[in-house]
Image: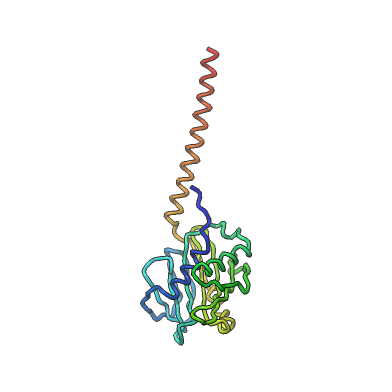
């Protein structure tokens, strides 16, 4: 069965959910984060503390040493290159819908656009919403790859995020994506498609051979 493009709703849901509810153990770090299995690496500012958890969709959360905000979240999801074919409006609406789906009904996109970073097409949006009577905003970068895609998010007070977006953009520019290991679920689906295709060809050949043999018997 051919894979369908996963909705960005689940992606942003995970990013927002992990930000406020998931338990983490704090690990002070000043380094370039790298995960060879996922095929991603990026540079983390020294002013952030990385909170890492066991393997899962949320790769890490990094919080400012000064306050709970700003917060940087990196999430991975099974991907499909078709995400790059989505129009900017569709991607922006998907992100906004995902925030509204988890309770931020006032979420709206201040803007959204496709960008080129290190020769790669990425999507960027800025989402505004209220959380605990606090006006906040999220800068969201989406990095599509063949096997999976990544969501890089920074959340901060609405006015403060504007001045700190250069930090997020610097992190986004540092993202390096290399030959990630194939996703087992994707590879399994590819094999199913291949088996179906081979089976269909075999069936057509068998039917053609049957009709040819029947024609020969009728002439005999």
| Image vertical order of residue 120 relative to residue 73, above or below | above
Image mark count: 0
Q: Is residue 136 above or below residue 115?
A: below
Residue 176 appears at what percent x and percent y? 51, 68
- Nearest the camera: 104 or 74? 104
Please identify the residue farthest to the bottom as the structure is shown: 66
Is residue 120 found left or right of 1 in the rendered image?
right
The residue lying toward the viewer, choosing from 73 and 94, is 94
Pick out the residue farthest to the top. 220
- Asked where in the image residue 25 lies, by quadrant, the reply is bottom left
Q: Is residue 130 above or below residue 6?
A: below
Q: Percent position (x, y) of residue 105?
A: 54, 71
Q: Could you tell me residue 38's position as x and y percent?
A: 44, 64
**Left or right of residue 54: residue 78:** right
In the rendered structure, the answer to whether residue 31 lies left or right of residue 172 reads left
Task: Depth check: give the residue in front, 202 or 99.
Answer: 99
Q: Is residue 9 above or below residue 45?
A: above
Check the image and tell me how it is coloured: rainbow
Left or right: 115 with respect to 147? Answer: right
Q: Position of residue 66 (x, y in %)?
A: 46, 87
């Amino acid at each position: 069965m051919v894979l369908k493009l996963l909705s960005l709703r689940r992606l942003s849901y995970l990013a927002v959910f992990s930000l406020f509810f998931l338990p983490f153990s704090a690990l002070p770090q000043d380094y370039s984060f790298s995960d060879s299995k996922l095929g991603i690496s990026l540079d983390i500012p020294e002013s952030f503390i990385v909170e890492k958890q066991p393997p899962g969709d949320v790769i890490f959360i990094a919080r400012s040493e000064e306050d709970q905000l700003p917060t940087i979240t990196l999430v991975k999801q099974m991907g499909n290159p078709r995400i790059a074919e989505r129009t900017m409006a569709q991607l922006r609406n998907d992100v906004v819908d995902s925030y509204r789906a988890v309770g931020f009904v006032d979420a709206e996109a201040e803007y959204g656009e496709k960008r080129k970073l290190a020769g790669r097409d990425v999507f960027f949006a800025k989402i505004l919403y209220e959380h605990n009577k606090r006006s906040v905003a999220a800068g969201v970068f989406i990095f599509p790859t063949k096997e999976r895609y990544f969501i890089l998010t920074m959340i901060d007070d609405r006015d403060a995020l504007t001045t700190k977006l250069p930090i997020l953009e610097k992190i986004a520019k540092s993202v390096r994506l290399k030959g990630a290991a194939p996703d087992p679920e994707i590879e399994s689906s590819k094999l199913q498609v291949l088996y179906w295709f081979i089976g269909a060809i075999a069936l057509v050949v068998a039917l053609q051979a049957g009709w040819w043999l029947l024609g020969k018997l009728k002439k005999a």
